[in-house]
Image (cartoon, rainbow, N blue to C red):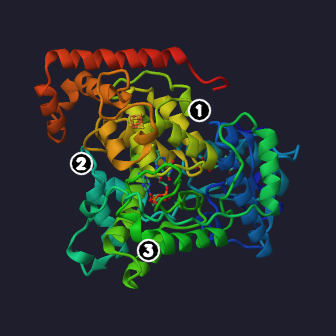
Amino acid sequence: MLGPLPRESPQKRARAVSGTLRLILGDQLTPGLTALDGLDPASDVVVMAEVRAEATYVRHHKQKIAFLFSAMRHFAAELSARGVRVDYWRYDDPDTPESLDAVVAAALARHRPDQMVLTEPGEWRVRQMMETWRETLPVPVHIRPDTRFIATLEEFEAWAEGRRSLRMEFFYRQMRRKTGLLMDGDQPVGGQWNFDAANRKRLPASTHVPHRRRFAPDAVTREVLDLVERTFADHFGTLEGFGWGVTRADALRALEDFIAQALPSFGDFQDAMKTGEDFLFHAVLSPYLNCGLLTPLEVCQRAEAAFQAGAAPLNAVEGFIRQIIGWREFVRGLYWLDMPAYADTNALDARRPLPAFYWTGETDMACLAATVDVTRRTAYAHHIQRLMVTGNFALLARLDPRAVQDWYLAVYADAYEWVELPNVQGMVLFADGGRLASKPYAASGAYINRMSDYCRSCRFDPGEKLGASACPFNALYWAFLMDNEARLKPNPRMAMPYQTLARMEAGQRAALKAKAEDFLAGLDRTGPAPGY
Ligand code: FAD
Ligand code: DLZ
Ligand code: SF4
């Protein structure tokens, strides 16, 4: 809660007027942020703060904290260089309070502004905090919309009105029309809205995977890395090899690197996974987009320009743009529409605690070990690793949605609740009962074997269902279908797997169920990872 703040009469405040206090959060590092609109350098002050409460509300990956603190320090320095007065509260300054609430109280006492201006935050939790500021602070508090997104929250709400289930594809078309991206008048360029059918190819072993641009830490980042190593030693992840850019100039370089090196093959190999290749043909731009160093529209326009210049094919560029103006905007709209109840949905009644290997990586299942390993080393994993490896396991093993949410929110440099939560609740766990996805993304070992080379080095066999070497995903998959038959069988999109299940002999069904239960009992015996 807010610390003590002297309340003054309006007359006294009027005499002490020093302009507007503008608070900028760690994921609001955008020069065009609405909280900065109308800034008067002569009288206004910008407040930014590295605070314990934000750094520990989940135990964020060390690289996520270092990335954000360094990006915040660089952004503050850039504002100062433009003549803006910035009151920056560093984590290692003993005067820095522990929470945003307390920073705001201290900054108001220090600067005595006549109003405070904010941009709406990315999390329900922080929005609630801001609402209490409106009620309790002695100055007017103005919360402005976040115009960095393409759709306004009102626009999404109007689109969703009256629809029981929400499908990204239709919203996406509205966003194409709104932005004019890949549009030919009122029609999609190429005559189709979606070229996914041309995507999702297996990655031939001979395919050259480009080396991706990473960034050597400068002096500011090195100082932050030291701070994080000292202060957050018990958080997940390693700082070794930290390679994130921390300025807008870096982020623009990363965008150019993606456009030149990876975009042309982005569509084809969007769903592929390969041992030792952390980034494949993905953008690796989400940390920059989500903290504001890049804006979604500029990134999409750059990709469209590459298509127009003949430097990237339509299936790649359409697929990439869809991820951003489709999925990214869609999950944000859904988050704000359905919160706070959305976080508590648990349609499949999943209750199992998070197994220790999500933190330690210690498992014989090679695909899971590889995904946890890249996450630990880089605070990144690409979408198919998040969805079809750690996500698929969480779905099939019926892990508690809260525990899964906290894990995804902690371990990725791009994770903020507005984007993490719908991906976990809706896309991975089907906890929302189908609000976001038309069916659960459940898969057996065959899928992972088709889309990756992980199975080659695994002690399990994706082709086996019941033997000692059987891939655990297989029994878990069939047991999941059996256990959720009443709920999922009527879904027309689940017809194929349920037809296969129906053809199975009763004995085989029972054996698969017993095998899954045996595996899960073993998992439960391992208990949580020490320290988590
Ligand atoms: P690319 O694959 O190159 O895609 C380009 C961009 O499209 C991304 O940078 C991202 O901005 C956007 N995008 C793609 N897929 C999604 C999606 N499903 N939802 C929203 N935006 C998308 N993304 C986050 O930004 N933050 C998260 O906290 C997050 N948590 C996730 C949790 C789970 C369980 C899953 C399955 C996905 C999650 N995603 C999250 C979505 C997606 O995995 C990441 O956006 C992507 O891996 C980021 O890497 P990239 O920049 O290389 O993306
Ligand atoms: C994620 C994060 C972290 C680790 N640290 C800070 C911080 O010290 N100061 C800050 O202003 N923001 C931080 N953030 C981002 C906030 O948690 C984020 O603004 C909210 O979650 C709303 O999206
Ligand atoms: Fe993963 Fe199963 Fe393949 Fe092993 S065999 S890598 S557990 S899918």
Residue identified by numbered label 1: 359
- Which of the 4 image quadrants contains residue 203? bottom left
Mark 3 secondary-structure assignment: helix
Distance CA(mark 3)–CA(mark 1): 36 Å
Q: Residues within 10 Å of mark 2 (few under 14, many from 20)?
A: few
One can see residue 150 in this view: yes
Depth check: give the residue in front, 108 or 373: 373
Callouts 1 and 2 close, C-beta under 8 Å: no
Q: Residue at x 12, y 26 (%)?
A: 502
Residue 162, numbered label: 2
Residue identified by numbered label 3: 303
Q: From this viewpoint, which residue is outermost toward the right?
A: 94
Q: Residue at x 57, y 65 (%)?
A: 212
Amino acid type at circle 1 is Trp
Among numbered discs 2 and 3, the one appearing first in the sequence? 2
- Quadrant field for ligand 3: top left
Distance CA(mark 2)–CA(mark 3): 34 Å
